[in-house]
Image: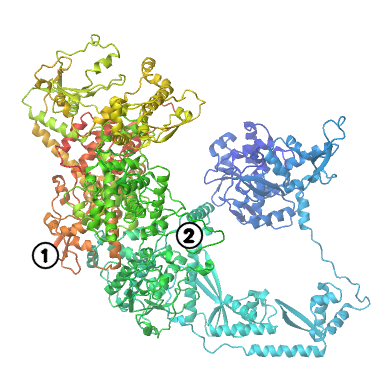
Amino acid sequence: MCTTSGGSWISAVFDEIALEGLDGVTLPWLWTLLERRLQCGSPLPEKLQQQVWTLLLRSTDKVEFFKLKAERPLLPPYDRSKDLDSDAGLPLVPKTCPFLRLPFTPIHDGHIMGNCADFKTRKAIDVKNLKKMTASEATTSWHQKMAIVANQEQRWMALKSPNAFSSIVFTPQLYVFLECIGRSRFNGEQTAGTWSLMNYFKDSSLIFYSKSKLMLQGMITAQSYIERANNKTVCSVLLTLPRFFHVYKSHQQRAIEKLYMEIQMRPSHHILVSEIPDHLEELTTAQVKKVTQSHGFRKFYETTQVRLPVGDSAKDSKKLRKVTVLRLRNPDLKFDELMPSQDSINEAKEEKTSAEFLSQNHAYLDMPLELECLRAIMRFGSRGIGTAELSQYVSVNCHTARGCLKYLRREKVINEFTENVGKTRITRFVAGAQAAADVNLKQEILEKEVQQLQCRDEPTMPPTVDIVMRDLPDITANIRQMTLPKSVNKNLERETQSLVERKKLVVQQIDQKCIIHTYELMTAIYKAEHSVGKQERICRKSLFRILLRMQLAGILNVYELTLQCDKGLRLYRLATHPKIDMEHEQMKREVLRLKNNFHLINEERLSRPGQVNNTKKRKELVAAKRQQLKGQPKPNAPKLLVACILHEFFFYLVGEQPRDQKPLPMSPELLEHWKSAEPSLMTRQFLSEWQADESHILPYTEEINWRTFVPPLPIYNNKPPGWFYFMDAVERMPLSLIMRICRIERESMEQLRPHLQHPVRQHYLLRQLQTQNLIPRPRQQQLFLSTLRLLNNMGLIQVSQSQVGRDGLQRWVYFNRRSCLLDTTPSTGHNYNCISEGRTYEELPFEFNTREQVADYWAKLQHICIYTKLGFVKHRERKVGTKQQLRLPLLVFVRTVDFDEAVELDNASVPGDHKGAAGLSSLLFAHQFRHWSWVKNKSGTVRKAPALKTTGKASAALPVTKRLSLVRLKPVPKLHVRKARGTASVTEQRKRKSGPRDDVDRDALRNMRTLRVTWSAAEDQILKMGRAVYLFIDAPLLALALCNVGSICRDVIRQYLGICNKTTQACVRRLQFLLRQKRDQPDVPNWIYTMQTQPEISSIYNEGFLKELKREYPLRSDQTDALLIHFVIILGKLHRLINSADTIRSQFILPDNMEDYHRQFRECIPLNSDHQDVGQVLYSNPSCETDLQVTVAQGVLHSILCCAKDKTLFNLQAFEIYKHFSEEVLNTAFNNARTNSLLVAVKRRNIHTISRQVSGPAHSLSSKYKCRLIYLKLGHVLYDTYYAFEQRLHEQDAIECRQVTSPNFAQLLLLGEWMAKNRLHLVLQLPANILTVDTSSMSRTCGSASDRILDHYSSIFDNAPQTEYAKRLESECSARQAARVRFHPANLTYRLQCSVYNQLSKLPLRAMHFFCALDSLGQSVNISCARLELGECPFGCIMRSGNYLNAVERITYEHRALLKQLVADTLPQTQLQLQLDNSTAGSTTLTVSTSNLLALIQQLEAYWRQQQHQQECKDLGKALAERTLNKLTDWRTLCTGLLDFEAGKPDEEHTQDYEPSLNKEERARAQDVFVVHLPTIQLKTKAEPSKEQLQAKHAQLRKGVLEKVINTSYWRYTENTFDTLLPTLKAKDYDASAIQHMEEILGYIEQRPLGVMGTELRRIFPFGKFLMDALHEMEAHYLIKRVGVASHMYVHKQHMRNWVVHTFHIKRLERERVQGLVAASPATPQAVLGRKRKAAVDESEQPSTSKQAKLALDELKNSEDSDSNDSMANRRSKRVEINANKPKAPVASLTVDTVTEDVIVMRPQPWIRVNGSLNRRVLDRWLGAILSECISRNGCTVHSLFLRFPHLLPVELMLLLELLCDLDCIHLMEMEPPPVNVETTYEDELKEQQVTELYDPIYTYVKCHCNAIGCLTNFIGLKQYSSEFI
């Protein structure tokens, strides 16, 4: 119990309530406090609670009861001592606030003070109502909603110390400060830290001064407190009330005290340093070291070295050692002094030395002080003496001297004057008549000079009076006369020479500028005084005194201007001419200027992270900014394209738009005219919104583009024509034009989205949209200023001087009407940035009178600059100097001109040295492509292109006779010349390394990001292929050098692999490295052999090829060029041979390892395995407009790829769709398609450019796409077979019983489905006799029974048209290879030849080293036992190659003669003994020859067989392994097969084995013929509807499904609103509540521009089936649309533009007439980007080329698919009549005058073509694929289907599932996950319901119906497509 309670529990209760302050205490918290205070057990006894409650109800004079507005949180009691971390030794800051900290709300209401956030909202409770309750009832009833508050006297007595008197006046903040400390009790409050008083008082200085003030009064105590927060140490001060003081010691303080006690207990008063960790066991060694080295520890302790005896002192007393010990610095130090008290610290801080009075040793003791001061003043004469000098002279203090001077002045004995000494103004005193006269004379002269100070009669007006400035109503201005405080107004009558000079300077500045700021005056005065040698700077107070005197004298006016905007406030002080008052025009202009500056300053300030009030948000902004700075810097905008746009804008303002142009009225006719160019414009809705807007924005032109809302420039009366003020032009810049020249951040795009999506508002001006702050002012200023300088250096504009301060944009601009260019494309030579000087260039003059002339100028300029041969860095002029000197000069304005001389200088002259591209200055670097393109090259991750995809194995080759040469051709001899030391020759100097050879090399060097590039396996393969072709051609070195090979390989890598950082030299060096490391073996020899044996290559490129080439091309250069072309052709053919399928590799060969197995059976891997394809991508809903546009563009690309094999080209539609997307969107969509393996580049036979009509599309759907769609568990052929069999059953209704023999899989499925539906009855008839084989009667006894059967029968097949049985049996045990025999039901026997390569593929790896040894004949090999134990081959192993069978074939061909000797057993053999059994034996070196080849191979094979015997016992069994242990490979038989084998040729010697056995004369024997009797199935169908009824039912279902597909894809712009839907809803009997719910749903969807997820609607509006009905009604009325990417979303019709594309259809006849235009139109995103860049220069306001062609076409022709004709005809958005004979139309050759065109608005989907027609082929294939997956994985979730088919968007796949549900193939079941808690038993049944559209894919699974395949086949029908769409 605390001492202040006096031992009374009653006082303790009131003390606890009072300590809680004005916020009060709740009953549960009071019981917790009393538990700790009274220590009566936990919880507090109910009896004691009742006594306390009764006491409180009776003490209404001390406490009050209040009802809180909301419950107060209840936290557990907090104990600061428990925060101590034993490991760190310091308290740890909790992650969350451990105690309740209520909001900071200081209250001061009369005598009531404190902190209470709900002081005004809480209500008092009458005690009478509380007396009816007991303590427990009150606690339960009120809980945390009732607060008990002590009165002010009780609260003050609890805070102040007993018997203490406070002399300070408490402010509300100071009282709350003390109240917080009291509420914390023993825990105290910290001055710094996460949960400190900084949460209440943001200013640390307020906390410091409050703490100091309360400590001086003795009301609080303080101690240092150290804690750890986020691995950082936080030092603060812990404040508590004196009665709650508790010492919190750190581990350093505890260590100091513990060591103090240990040292004092020892007689030597020291301790060994090595023993310190033993005494401080709670600290680690590192902590001990850190503590002992700290400043606080060294303050008391020191280390020294002493000598101590070694061991026992009795034995070795003479041996001493030097050790380090720790001792106290002060041996007499007391224990209490180890921890200094806060009082002593405060006394030391507050101790100040009092100023001593001056010594009076020299004073006159018998003379009065006044007389002594007078004598001192008279002694100094006219110089005078100051107060400080007088006090020092007469030896008195300053106060006494000042009193004496006052007395002498009253007696008028002395006079005073003032003078300036440096920055100090000193008052001096003089005595005597002569001195007084001199002082008065000086003062009169100064007063006369002051009286003569006057400003000019009329103010000087600045030259910027013509500038029009706009007012900002948001900023309020208050201007008034400036008044100074009284402290500044004193001593105004004194004048000094310095003050008079400064007044003169002020008058001079007012005469120069009629209005000037005070800070400008201070700067001007400082500069003037600094020029005469004064170093002092005038202060603001001195300047105000001067201005006040001059204002009182009428010399000038001084005003104070206050600007306020929201919370920002800014004060300006202006000195003006006396004739300029507050209502003067110039003063108003100055106020407007300051308003604009203040607005810009506010924008910059608010954009800084430091200005954010939220600390967390500020940290996030700072972290994001740092992360942005760490990333790659954004590329700069192309300056010449920006200059082009700005130049066109200037021309429109100056030369095209009339100055008196009036705005046009906004009428429905004008909007209808605009709608012809913008189909998505809702005319009535826009007109109503425009009329409702207060500020009516009127158009100035009838065309809809960026010129529509641009008002004309003001008329400048005093300026010649052609001049305009640049800021006036900036204010007239529309949003659409800003988007073309500026790259706005993605965060700002969120604000611009509603404007950019609108077809009209996107052309509003920035000031009309209130979006000027989207671009930071420094960035905007830098962009415009750099563009103005560029245009000025190009001679297109002239500029004047800057008009306002240092802002370079505040200037006048003159638009030049003439210019000229030089055609520099004939420039030759490898120059850097200057054209060749020795050539003459044609001059091209230009005049800017029309819009077309401006466009022609920029088009010609771009053409000349791009095609001028410049940019060779190695030919740059070498300069020596510092980096600053070598840096290129910055671009500045050429010159500033006057208004009158601008017309004379407009003479088509171009500034600069005329050495750059197009005759411009060479400093502009106009030839660089980055200045002409928005697309910037970025190096990314390297991806393999499918064009050169490798499979890991090389192709096979056919043997023909051709000499093989592997020797380096024409090696360059090296001259080894020894150079004398110290001598150097010019010819012997090492040449500089060659730089880039062409532009491609320069681009590769720019793309290099590291010093050394990395090489992938695909790149190495291309280099090795180039090496093989190089050796195959065997051309002279001068005709085909190695650098040519590197250049071709570089281009192939760049084109097909997409790797753009490899130069020619890098490719050559890499190839040489591969040769040195022998990594070209054995692939390069195998490829050369393949080319030599391939008739397609060897027939053309043989021995006479080079001679014919030389005879055809006499010139060496032409011969080299032709040879390079043939090199590329051979390289392409070799690539096709390597990846061809007609090789031995295509035969079935058992996989050699698990890797090959996974490669061949990758599609069989389940989805949840570790080997899942990493290329799968999950989609997400769009988070911004850019993501949505990328998704739509990718959908269009997908649709185009799916109809790539159609007979009709859709180039016009594709171009029309693509051109509305930006380059960034198209590039991102195309890259995503490539990354997600949606498309691949089409392989070409040659590199020449071919027409689109001949070559087809450049990209096609990838093989992964095909695998997902075609290679299924249930193939597409199954559905066709099923449908045909079902139709055959329906046609045979007359037959009651049908027989089916050997049914195929589709027929079995139909039987199963019909039996499940009880539509069929089956009867199975088995064969009468079944042949059995008796193996016991066979003569051969060795081997197993299966081996004896397989000697006769290996495989069983039938001879029926369709396979009845298929079974393949192969021998795994028998060493004898069995022949493969086909048996047929008709007793026909066929034999299948077993290739020798099949036998080689089954040999163990140890046997294959025979060919390695054969390939190493004549070479020396080193045989090491250690390496043999690891299974390494001592020869050049062929098993490391991609396809070892090709190597075997090559070796067989090369050593054919040797193998023939081996077969004939005529090969000479010698004995060879290798010591392989001894593991300690070393290595043996021998030469492989024909004599020791067979013996060497047999010994190695036996050794390896012995080593692998244990593994073979596990695999084959012990008995079989023992039998085969000593059996060697029969190489004679294998070599015979190799010599006789010829691929692709039938075995003519065994033709009789291929003929039927029954055709022979003799009868087939029983052991040669296997008779198979087949079972038969009898079918009996039950009663079912007629065929006509079934067909009608299926046709109606098919029509409904197709209608849903069309409705899902198409969209129509309407003027429908919810009001137009009301009659329909009322007609369907919807009540008012349902209509209101529909309106709420529609409003909720309208608020989300990107749409609302369906699951979110289901969660917010849980209406069940009514929600789906409401959505269907609104979707049918075209108010909303179901869209989405990852899930179904609903979007309002106002935001549909980004979800759909606009397209059109062409009739068949019109397509034939515009066939050339269709073929010439680009259809890929890259081609569209190229066309857009080409058309960007000559952009005009007429519709684009493709758009004119589109508008000139006839209405939509009927669809090729009959199912989609009716649906498309009703969904045309509008009908427009267009004149086809407009000028510059690309279809001017058409003879049609007027054509009609329908715009189709649709969502791109794979089964919807870009012309709007339905692609049934794609739809049927995808439905079959999805159903196949659902049947094979019945019960799979929808989410798993997303993973299985990553090429479809999830919403597209969900649509297919919905269609399958409509076809009654499947149904979807959604599970409701139960809530999981501690008491969950998992015994309850899982709730699930059937869903169709809105569901969660993760918790929804698919259940297939038993007749699913039949339902789908009835929908598809018999669709035998001639070709697939892939």
- Amino acid type, mark 1: Thr
In the image, 1013 versus 1443, the foreground residue is: 1443
Q: Are marks 1 and 2 in contact (CB under 8 Å)?
A: no
Q: Position of residue 1100 (x, y in %)?
A: 22, 48
- The residue depicted at 68 percent of the width and 88 percent of the height is 447
- Label 1: few (<14), some (14–19) or many (≥20) C-alpha neighbours in 10 Å: few
Element at label 2:
loop
Please indicate whether residue 207 sits to the left or right of residue 1058 in the image.
right
Q: Nearer the viewer, residue 1421 or 1628?
A: 1421
Work out whether residue 1801 or residue 491 is closer to the camera in this orientation and state it.
1801
Rendering coords of residue 407 (x, y %): 82, 79
Residue situated furthest left in the rendering? 1294
Mark before the other along the chain sequence, 1 or 2: 2
Which dot, 1 or 2, sits closer to the camera?
Answer: 2
Quarter of the image where one finds residue 1752: bottom left
Query: Which residue of the protein is positioned furthest toward the top in this rendering?
Result: 1337
Residue behind mark 2: 990
Say if 572 sits above or below 308 in the image. below
Q: Name the residue carrying label 1.
A: 1791
* Tally of numbered tags: 2
Q: Amino acid at mark 2?
A: Arg
Give the quadrant of the C terminus.
top left
Q: Quadrant of residue 1823?
A: top left
The quadrant of the rendering that contains the N terminus is top right
| 1008 relative position to 369: left or right | left
Looking at the rendered structure, the secondary structure element under dot 1 is: loop
**Real-space CA distance between mark 1 and mark 2, rounded to the nearest whole angstrom:** 72 Å
* Residue 685 on image: x %, y %: 27, 60
Q: Is residue 849 above or below residue 277?
A: below
Q: Is residue 65 visible?
A: yes
> Which numbered disc covers residue 1246?
none
Q: Looking at the picture, does residue 1912 appear above or below residue 677?
A: above
